[in-house]
Structure formats: structure tokens, C-alpha cells
Amino acid sequence: MINSRPDPSPSAHDRVYRGLRTRIMHGDIAPGQALTLRGIGREFNVSMTPARESLRRLVAEGALTLSSSGRVSTPELSNERIEELAALRSLLEVELASRALPRAHFALIERLQTINASINEMIARQDAVGYIRTNLEFHRTLYLRAQAPAMLAMAETVWLQLGPTMRALYGRLRRKDPPRFHRMILAALKAGDEPGLRMAIRSDVTQGLKMLVA
Amino acid sequence: MINSRPDPSPSAHDRVYRGLRTRIMHGDIAPGQALTLRGIGREFNVSMTPARESLRRLVAEGALTLSSSGRVSTPELSNERIEELAALRSLLEVELASRALPRAHFALIERLQTINASINEMIARQDAVGYIRTNLEFHRTLYLRAQAPAMLAMAETVWLQLGPTMRALYGRLRRKDPPRFHRMILAALKAGDEPGLRMAIRSDVTQGLKMLVA
DNA sequence: GCGGTGTTTTTGTGATCACAAAGAGCGCGT
DNA sequence: ACGCGCTCTTTGTGATCACAAAAACACCGC
């Protein structure tokens, strides 16, 4: 669903939407944070109309929740919901990785290794938002090779829903070691080992969850 | 995502949204059909504002496509996209059915059998829209038992994207025989046979696709 | 007849407004 | 000190408008 072509005239509501979306996905906003139409409008220098459209769009994608009185805020997910979303990530991303595997040439693996190095840097720097962003870039770069845009869009929707929660999670986690499953993913890609890749993805995706429950 | 509680004050845009959504999901609208803001507004007796919100929401869910000039229309899916969406249905619905299996008691199976009888009636009556609606009701009734609202919502989003296409498909299909895989699903549910259920769901979901490619 | 060109109509966009409901704050009474 | 009620502010909703771009249409020359 991500389109990288330079849109000649990005409509106002699209600009607002994209701005908020990346902020939410990367965990810039904490769970439970309320957003107001006029506040968004002021921040992006637009009227209430485009602000409303972008907020409602994000609500439709599950990135924000709509209270009964119409107020929108970033969601505070229950543990059950988090587990369900992790299961969805696993389901979708294992399939995406599996489809990407036959198309994963050396250049791609090299790029993934570069991104992985950035991730380690973010960890060393204790930069939670940067870590989430770079980690998602790692996954998206791989899944783009699957040539399955609808499936990738769904995976991104799940990321979006988990964004604020992941921030709260990793923020308090203060991990020090690099993600070990990423090395397993890279090894499986190099070896063309599909079962190994599926297991590595599943482990990587559900890894964060285990830390939460603990 | 479907909420059956009687909302005391359904906002205008919600009423419009729901109306359009069920129409699209059930295949009331043919692929490629264009929708205009003022037209929707007239039809539902609202101004452009709620019409716009509902259209944009449906676009966000992939139920409608937005042309470069801002016009919205029901999508005409490529064969590749249809295959991908069918794969998504398979992925999600197999998991949903698998989760519903341990919770599927006799009352549920009985209800499914009743719905299945309705499906046969729709087929005999050559009612394409009624067939799609009842068929989705069969699946949703089963999946509701999975207690996985986010996953069910995603499956419904896929149905929504396939709605107009399924209509065009089944409309020209003129099938005469009842869906054989539904009997397999019921049998597997009664027997508590999980592998059999997974296979039956996968077959049922991808069955329509095969007819399209042929 | 046909293609192109001008006009006219339709359509989406974003701003603004009036309104009602929800929230926040404050003070009064007990 | 605490709860209740009142008021003022904030907030979302939906209608309407002006504007620009796009589409539809009609007309004219060839």
C-alpha cells in the first residue's frame, strides 16, 4: 500500500495522515494519548476538515480508537489483544517471508545486513523509537520481495495497531543485546532454508510478547 | 467488528457507512461502479460531509479505490490481486476455524446447518446476492467462536475487498449444486478433526478462485 | 462523419459556521 | 473535607460555500 512515487500534489489530508501514521507506527505517541481535531489542525496548519479525515482513516485502520463520545485516542491494548495481534503478525509475516525467500538475492540480503547493523546501533544508543523504526524497515524490506501488496498492507496495519504499545514496551525494556533472531533469518535466507526461515520469523515476531507477559 | 447492540444515536456518517459497506460486501454493486459524494448524500439524505467520511473510510479498508483525481469507485481486481486475497482468506480463515473448533458445541453446528440450508435455497433460487450474504453468514457464525476479534475484522476486510468481484463471479456462474465443502466443514467440526477442518476451509475458500481462472 | 476545441456541468477539496453534547473548573452548602 | 450543581470551555458533527480541476458535452471546421 505504500507508494513511493513522488505524488505531484499531496492533498492536505494525505499529508496529515502520513505524518500521524508514521508517528504512531514508530511509537512516537504513547498509549492512551488523546488527539483533538483542532489540535491536529493547528499542528499541520489545516482546518478541521482534513484533520477529521485523517483521524477517521486511522481509526478505520485500527491505529486509533474512537470513544463513544467521538473522541479519538491512541489505543491501550489488553493483553489478549496484544497476543492476538502477535499471532496475526506471525501468520502474515511467516507467509510473506516464505514468498520472499525464492526471490531473495544477494543484494537484498546485503541490504538486510546493513539495516541490521543500524538496529544494533539503535539498541546501543537506547533509542526506542529508532529501534522500532529500523526494525520495521528490516521486515518491510524483506516482505517487499514477496510481491504481495495486500498481504503487506495487512501486516503494516497490524504494526500500526501495535505501535504505541511497542513503544511503551521497548521503552521500559532497556535491552542490551542485538536481536538474535534476525541473524537466524539472514542465515535461513542465505541457505534457502524455508522451514528455518518460517521458524525464525515466528520466533522474532513473538519474542517481544514473551517479555511483556513475563 | 460488527456490533449488534442497538446504538442509541447512530451518527449520520455511520449509517451511511454501514449501508454502503453491506451493499459492497454482499455484491450489490458491480466492479468499476463510480460513487459520487453528492449522489451518496442525496441517497441517504445527508450533506457531503458524512458522505465523504464514509467513502474515505471504505477506501481505507480497501473496499473502494480512489482514482488519482479523487473519484472513488468500486475496484476492478486483477487476477493476481484476486489470488492474493484468496490466499489471505485461506490464511486467516483456517486459523479462525482452528481456534473456533474447540469451542464449537452442538448448538453452533446446528445453527450452521440451518444457515447451510438457506444457502442451498439461495442457489436454487439463483439469487447471487443472497447466496453471498448467506455464505458469509455461515463463515462469520463459525469464526465468531474463535474469540479473535482483530482476526475476524481482517477476514471481513478481505471479504469486503472481494465483494463486487464475487458478485460478478457468481452472477455469471449459475451454479446448481450446493457447496460440497460446507458439508466437509460440518463433518470435521462434529468429529473434532482439526486437520480435516483446515483442509475443508482452505478448499472452500479457494474454490471460487479456481472457477474464475478456468 | 470525425476529430478537436471551446464551454458548461459535475465533482472533490478545504474552510468556516452554528449547534449540541461532553468535560473541566469552580463555588456553594452541608 | 466532600459532594453536588452550575457555568464556561472545549470538542465533535454536519451543513454550506467558494474554488479549481476534471469530465461531459456540444459545436464547428474539415
Image: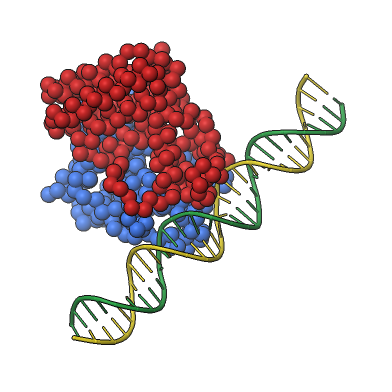
Chain colours: A red, B blue, C green, D yellow
C3 relative to B110 in the view: left or right: left
Residue at image location 27% in from the left, 32% down from the top: A140
Q: Position of residue A86 (x, y in %)?
A: 35, 25
Q: Nearer the viewer, residue A115 or A183?
A: A115
B173 relative to A31 in the view: left or right: left
A38 versus A112 height, above or below: below
Q: Nearer the viewer, residue A180 or B150?
A: A180
Residue at image location 41% in from the left, 38% down from the top: A21
Q: Position of residue A136 (x, y in %)?
A: 32, 29
Q: Nearer the viewer, residue C10 or B63?
A: C10
From where the camera sits, is residue B84 visible?
yes
Q: Nearer the viewer, residue A5 or D6?
A: A5
A198 versus D6 height, above or below: above
Which quarter of the picture shows residue A110? top left
Q: Position of residue A98 (x, y in %)?
A: 19, 29
A153 versus A178 height, above or below: below
Label count reads: 0
Residue at image location 32% in from the left, 13% down from the top: A177
The quadrant of the rendering that contains the N terminus of chain B is top left
From where the camera sits, is residue B134 visible?
no
Residue at image location 47% in from the left, 43% down from the top: A55
Q: Position of residue A172 (x, y in %)?
A: 45, 17
Which quarter of the picture shows residue A106? top left
